[in-house]
Image (cartoon, rainbow, N blue to C red):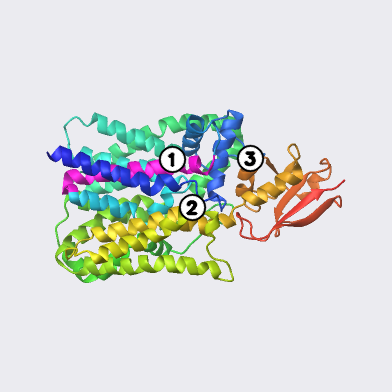
Amino acid sequence: MKRAIYFSSGFVLFVALCVLWLPWLGETLFYSKGEPREAVVAMSMLASGDWVLPVSCGSDIPYKPPFLAWLIASLAWLLNGGVVNEYIARLPSALAAIALVMGSYAWVRKIRGEQFALFMALILAGSVEFYRAATACRVDMVLTACMVGAIYMLFEVRQHRGRDNFWRYAVATLLLTCGVLTKGPIGAFLPCLVAGVYLVFHGDRFFPTLGRMAALCFAACVVPAIWYYYAWLEGGRHFVELAWEENFGRLTGTMSYSSHEKPFWYNFVTFIVGMLPWTLLVLMASGALRRLMQRPFKPAGLLAVTAVLVVVGFYCIPSSKRSVYLLPAYPFMAYGVASMAETLAETRINSAFTRVLAIIAIALPAVAVLTIWVPLGGFSFSAAGWWAWPLLALPAAVAIGWLMQAMPRGNIGGAVLIVWGILTCYGGALMPAALNRFSARDDAATVAALAGPAGKIYTVGRPEAAPSYCLNYYLGDRMERIATAAEAAKAPRGTVLVFPDRADTVGLPPAYHLSLLTDRSADTRHPMLIAVKQR
């Protein structure tokens, strides 16, 4: 009977996750440089047949190892005739998020029971930063799924010591290998650091633990080393310099250009914001937090605390800081929030928290509609599908339904439903309505029309100085990069140059007619200029 209940709850959770993420992945166009930069790598793989180190934008090699691009290209080949669109590009992240939430549910269910595991999984999926990463074409969610999955496996090794752990080590090694192939050695080092610190805290001896974790890291780097070797053969010194800078220069603050440099406290602020709305519950229950911390840690609780402290502490070291770097801590923070909600089950704090969310959910549709008439520009629901209006009403409907019910005191299920209603509304209606107008798709159509089907299209400047990834994606990777505008002097008539207004136009041949392409580039948020050769 218990197995049937577990299967039923797990199946319902799986369906809910699919409904939360999968229908809306392609509704929002690419509107920044990050997502199309990853998508173009997969596009160039399919176009060139080079799955080791494909070249995009005429001369750019990938900034990251190829696992995400392999996934995107494979899904495009299997599901979409080899075409990489926004949906296909984001699908690996969504599938990785679903796998991670389901894995977290399965891990916690054996330790804390069905209800706790379900709430922990729902809280994790309903965290703002986790939801955002699950719907983005970036390496971070795939990397997080690999890292956290490996930590779960190593926890199970400790729990089942001496009992057929070979397959658990094998799965952990496979996940760590995929992590290295996603973002370099950090994909194996950080999970092994978390697991190693946990094992030492749990009573294991330091040097044997260090040896096991070092062996795992080494094993996880064997297959990636083959890729690095062949990438070095193709990319030579330029690849080596880029790989060193991305993996070690970013950590030590010795990069050749500034990249997301933030102060020490930035990680703590972004972690608090990223865990919304659940950090609001923690704030409201701060008085009861002392009671929760006085309880002795069980093994899973010790792992959760260790993982959060190690991940957040580790990413305080480099000067380069981004909110997505902290994603491996989110499942373990969700474990802590679920523990708090369980502790508060006999209080009114959970209900008060849910009422606050209900008020926000009821006000959300009205605020969104009012922004349509804001002079500076608000939401444009014509950019979304017909379903935008029903989805806009969903959070308010869920909130009103909860308020009309006689819910038991301390029940947090209403909060979960309201949060999921808000996120569904955001992904299917608010996000495309707010962001599609910032996409470079229409600008790309203008450039393509001026250049014609066979015309040359150039972007001017170094990659970090003149990024045009979004425009290049919607141009089908037709753009090539030149260092200065003067290099286009001998280009044929009809050649198009595209560059930000801050770029150096000294030496632009007089045969080119210069004009404004857009007053807000999707890549730089600055005006973008266009020059067409007239003769």
Q: Say which of 437 and 310 sits in front.
A: 437
- Residue 422: percent from left, percent from top: 37, 59
Q: Residue at x 24, y 58 (%)?
A: 413
* Residue at the left extreme, as displayed: 1
Q: Earlier in the sequence, mark 2 or mark 1?
A: 1
Q: CB under 8 Å between callouts 2 and 3?
A: no
Q: Decide whether the magenta segment is chiefly helix, strand or loop.
A: helix
Categorize mark 2 by other alpha carbons within 10 Å: few (<14), some (14-19), many (20+): few
Q: Amino acid at mark 2?
A: Trp
Q: Residue at x 35, y 49 (%)?
A: 328
Looking at the image, residue 266 lies above or below residue 188: below
Q: Quadrant of the N terminus?
A: top left
SS type, badge 3: loop
* Mark in the foreground, 2 or 3: 2
Q: Earlier in the sequence, mark 2 or mark 3?
A: 2
Q: Say which of 90 and 247 sits in front.
A: 90
Tell me the magenta residue range. Answer: 85-114
SS type, badge 2: loop
Q: Amino acid at mark 1?
A: Pro
Q: Residue at x 34, y 41 (%)?
A: 99
| Disc 2 target residue | 386
The CA span between labels 2 and 1 is: 26 Å
Q: Amino acid at mark 3?
A: Gly
The disc at residue 476 is 3
Q: Earlier in the sequence, mark 3 or mark 1?
A: 1
Q: CB under 8 Å between callouts 2 and 1?
A: no
The disc at residue 92 is 1
Residue 359 inside the magenta-drawn segment: no
- Regarding residue 383, the answer to whether it shows in the image is yes
The CA span between labels 3 and 1 is: 21 Å
- Residue 37: percent from left, percent from top: 56, 45
